[in-house]
Image: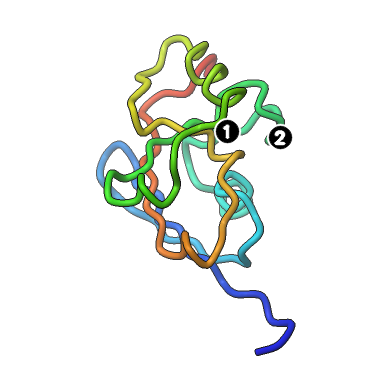
Amino acid sequence: MSGARLMAKVTYRQPDGSERTCVNFEGMTVMHLAIGSLVDGIDALCGGMRQCGTCHVYIAPEWWDRVGPAGEDEAAMIEALEGVEVRETSRLSCQIQLSEELDGLVVEVPADQPGI
């Protein structure tokens, strides 16, 4: 398999409980995969620049240890979100790089995104 890039799979769980699993090459962000797959609820208005928070997701609890907490700048952006529910498992999907370790990741899409 030399030179081959591994596929990474992410399941996006909507507020109504419906799920959609998308697959693409590792190395993308969770946000880029969502946008490219037209997943509802991840708007990413700033294009992944960690400026708007409209790619906010909740990491499924069973995945939290592998994904880990937000870095300092991302945490500050999450803390500044207004009009949305922020949880301990909140992350900006533009800051989560897909990797073999995250193959099968489940994220929950919030009911509302800031400013939308």
Q: Quadrant of residue 59?
A: top left
Q: Quadrant of residue 85?
A: top left
Left/right placement of residue 82 relative to residue 108 reads right
User: In the displayed structure, does residue 61 sit left or right of residue 107?
Assistant: left
- Give the quarter of the figure containing the N terminus: bottom right
Whether pointer 2 and pointer 1 mark residues with C-beta atoms closer than 8 Å, the reply is: no
Residue 17, percent from left and from top = 25, 45
Q: Position of residue 112 (x, y in %)?
A: 41, 23
Give the crowd class for mark 2: few <14, some 14-19, many >=20 residues within 10 Å: some
Under tag 2, what secondary structure? loop
Residue 15 falls left or right of residue 38: left
Q: Residue, x 40% and y 17% (percent of image)?
A: 84
In the picture, the disc for residue 47 is: 2
Where residue 90 appears, x then y in whole percent?
Answer: 41, 30
Residue 47 against residue 11 in the figure, above or below = above
Amino acid residing under circle 1: Asp
